[in-house]
Structure formats: C-alpha cells, structure tokens
Image (tube, rainbow, N blue to C red):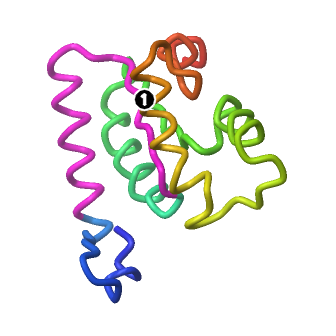
Amino acid sequence: MSLHHLDFPGSIGIAPETMRAVLEDILVSLYHHGFRRVALVNGHGGNVPSVNSAMINVLNDRPDYDVRDVLWYETTETVALVAELWPGLTTGHATADETSGSWRCARICAAGPCRLLTLARLRFRF
C-alpha cells in the first residue's frame, strides 16, 4: 500500500487489491490449520480498508472465526507509553512515537513481557 510514497527512493508499494488478496490467503491458511482467533497488528491507518475487506470476505463463510484488526498506536498501552516517553508529543507521521515506538517496543519485549500489547491483553479483548 502507500503508493503515494513511491516518489521517495526505496519505497515499495502494493495495490490495495493485492494486500486484500494476500491477507485473505493468510487468514484462510490459518483457519485451515486450526486457528480460530487471530489478531492482525496493523501500523498504518491506510491499510484498514483492505484489512477490513479481507476480514469480511473470509469471515462471511466462517462464523466460528474471530479476527481482529488492532492498530498498535491506538492501544491503551501504547498511548500510555508514548505519554511516558515523550510528554506533550504531537503524534503523527515521522514523529518520535512512529519512528521510535517500534524500536522501543522491540527492546521492551526482548527484555521480558511486552508493555505495549501483550498476548494476555489480546486474549482478554477477544
């Protein structure tokens, strides 16, 4: 996705239809292997229409399948951590939370239970 960023050297984009088709294939494969609860952790609001379309297409025929789209930067845990790390930050593209948040999350998760989005919290939200 993000085809509007292709003018920036090195940027890679895929068509929304491609993303939807890939997600559908992934979700169907997971279902085939017995998964019934899946969280798609998303980091780009522009992906939401393709993600939602894929989810609708897959879930229509699988009423026992629970798939959720989680925007990592909107979780309560992430909002609290951003406020702790960068008080008063105005969030948005290329700000500290977007560019550093994932690096910080990786370091926190590598050290122990992740404070941003734990599996226990995901299970609770289902």
Query: Residue 69: where, in percent of width, then height?
Result: 48, 39
Q: Depth check: 60 or 24 in front?
A: 24
Q: Which residues are magenta?
A: 18-44
> Image check: 26 left or right of 47?
left
Q: Depth check: 11 or 125 in front?
A: 11
Identify the amino acid type marked 1. Answer: Ala
Query: Residue 95: where, in percent of width, then height?
Result: 62, 62
> What residue is rendered at 34% in x and 48% in y?
54
Up-down relation of residue 12 to residue 103 (above or below): below
Up-down relation of residue 5 to residue 36 (above or below): below
Please identify the quadrant where the C terminus is shown. Answer: top right
> Image check: 11 left or right of 41?
left
Up-down relation of residue 24 to residue 7 (above or below): above
Mark 1: which secondary structure? strand
Query: Residue 82: where, in percent of width, then height?
Result: 69, 42
Q: Which residue is mark 1?
A: 39
Q: Quadrant of residue 65?
A: top left
Verify whether residue 32 appears in magenta: yes
Q: Depth check: 94 or 76 in front?
A: 94
Verify whether residue 23 appears in magenta: yes
Q: Residues within 10 Å of mark 1 (few under 14, many from 20)?
A: some
> Image check: 69 left or right of 13?
right
> What residue is rendered at 54% in x and 26% in y?
117
Please identify the quadrant where the N terminus is shown. Answer: bottom left
Q: Quadrant of residue 10?
A: bottom left
> What residue is rendered at 32% in x and 67% in y?
16
Q: Depth check: 12 or 24 in front?
A: 12
Query: Residue 21: where, in percent of width, then height?
Result: 22, 54
Residue at far bottom of view: 7
> What residue is rendered at 34% in x and 89% in y?
7
Q: Quadrant of residue 81?
A: top right
Up-down relation of residue 126 to residue 16 (above or below): above
